[in-house]
Image (cartoon, coloured by chain):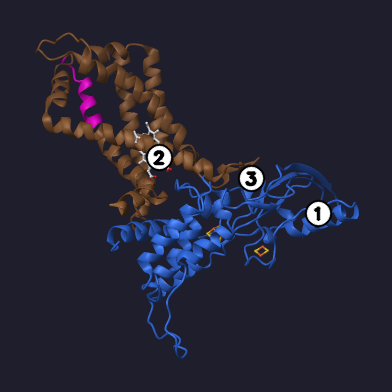
Amino acid sequence: MSWLSDTLTSTIGRKLVMSLTGLFLIIFLVVHLAGNFQLLADDGGLAFNAYAKFMTSNPIIKFTSYGLYAFILIHIIMSIALAVKNKNARPVGYDKVKGSANSSFSSRNMGILGFIIFVFLVIHLRNFWYEMHWGSIPMDEAGNKDLYAVVNAAFAEWWYVAIYVACMVGLAFHLSHGFSSAFQTLGVNHSKYTPFIKKLGIVYAILIPAAFASIPVIMFFNS
Amino acid sequence: MKFKLKIWRQKNNQDKGAFKTYELDGVSSDMSFLEMIDVLNEQLIDKDEDPVHFDHDCREGICGMCSMYINGEPHGPLRGVTTCQLHMRSFQDGETITIEPWRAKAFPIVKDLAVDRSAFDRVIQAGGYVSVNTGGTPDANEIPIPKSVADEAFNAATCIGCGACVAACKNASAMLFVSAKVSQLSMLPQGQVERSERAEKMVAQMDEEGFGACTNTGACSAECPKGIDLSNIARMNREYLGAKVGSQS
Ligand code: HEM
Ligand code: SF4
Ligand code: FES
């Protein structure tokens, strides 16, 4: 299988891994968002808590979630490996670079934007995911862990909501390039479809992070 | 016109190098950028100083030798041209112009602005060829090729190997150059014999030379004097991944 490791460690192979893991995360975000919208239901969090319980106990979801953890880690590790390789490819930099003349802001700052998402993930997982799995959370009326109360408490703090929204802006920029870039990396560049993929990427990059950000904002003003 | 020129000076590959600033007066707006440096060099020679070394050959935009990173862009601010086709009218009178060599590990600096681009030659040697039968000269147009395919292949073939794509790329990636060379042959019937081997070998050599990876920023294509399209990179990725999965070893 040395051809496989050869392929996956080549520059194109590494980008293939970035692209596939990135696309998986893109699909995941849609599913995650759909679940989050239950936070806005007017039932004191019962539906959301039941959903959270399902997501942490259903074996198929559990299996998928291990894949998700692995893919996020692979995406991050591969991005670091690529960043190191790319830095080595130009050991001495330019004095003056006019990047805005030839490329988009997002495309030139994927690493920094990714790092913002990473910081977000750490905070986010610590506050909600860790609490749900290993924290001691009181039960709600239906006997499920009351994750809703934990989320509600977090989103009552203005600074928490501010960080959340700022990170979603970072995600939006990451995806405004990442979405279409992932297709280009896979070799999907076609005069019929690429203009559509680019537009869809921009729509996704605005809509999904905005929808994520709207939840803490709405909960903040409701609290 | 009058300019302040901030130029990278480096005696040889081992030297650390530094910027040196020169004032140059009496430049005509119709001079090409290289002619402007010629004037500077005449003055330097008169003063018994070492002239600024730079590569050039055709001075008509076809050889790809005139590598210079001017004011933060390869070949300067004008689109679709090499440095020899850039004229001083593209600059403001009195402007400070920063001139740097291509910066890439795979393009070691020879002296001042001249870099060694033989890494490109080795990529070509690895797979940028086709097998042809010996014998009589084949008839022209013997092999039918659709016009659209011929045009696409020709567009890819217009790459002059100047290295601006590498210079422009934040990762010093050579993907645009290599993809143009892979594409130009893979689209034509004559290129089918070595097709999958070609993609594998040329990409392997590209990696071996220490070029960076592609982030799809598009800076290469925007700065390419021949406007080589990013679709070539997608094609190379298809060729490469397909070859890796499908080949016998
Ligand atoms: C820890 C957080 C993250 C980091 C550090 C990170 C880092 C990066 C970097 C550096 C790139 C560019 C790689 C290159 O082109 O050389 C990239 C590409 C990409 N990222 Fe992320 N990212 C993160 C999270 C995410 C998330 C959450 C998503 C999706 C929802 C995502 C989707 C993508 C996509 C689709 C690409 C484009 C792949 C390609 O060009 O082929 N990333 N990421
Ligand atoms: S692809 Fe364009 S920029 Fe790169 S070497 Fe060829 S002509 Fe020069
Ligand atoms: S000197 Fe030949 S392209 Fe400029």
Q: Position of residue A171 (x, y in %)?
A: 38, 32
* Chain containing the residue with disc 2: A
Which label belongs to residue B72?
3
* Residue type, numbered disc 2: Ser
Question: On screen, B49 above or below A223?
Answer: below
Q: Position of residue A211 (x, y in %)?
A: 31, 29
State the residue at coordinates (41%, 65%).
B198
Q: Residues within 10 Å of mark 3 (few under 14, many from 20)?
A: many
State the residue at coordinates (38%, 70%).
B194
Q: Which chain is brown?
A: A
State the residue at coordinates (38%, 47%).
A9
**Circles 1 and 3: CB atoms closer than 8 Å:** no
Which label belongs to residue B51?
1
Q: Nearer the viewer, residue B110 or B24?
A: B110
Residue lying farthest top?
Answer: A138
Disc 3 beta carbon < 8 A from ligand 2? no
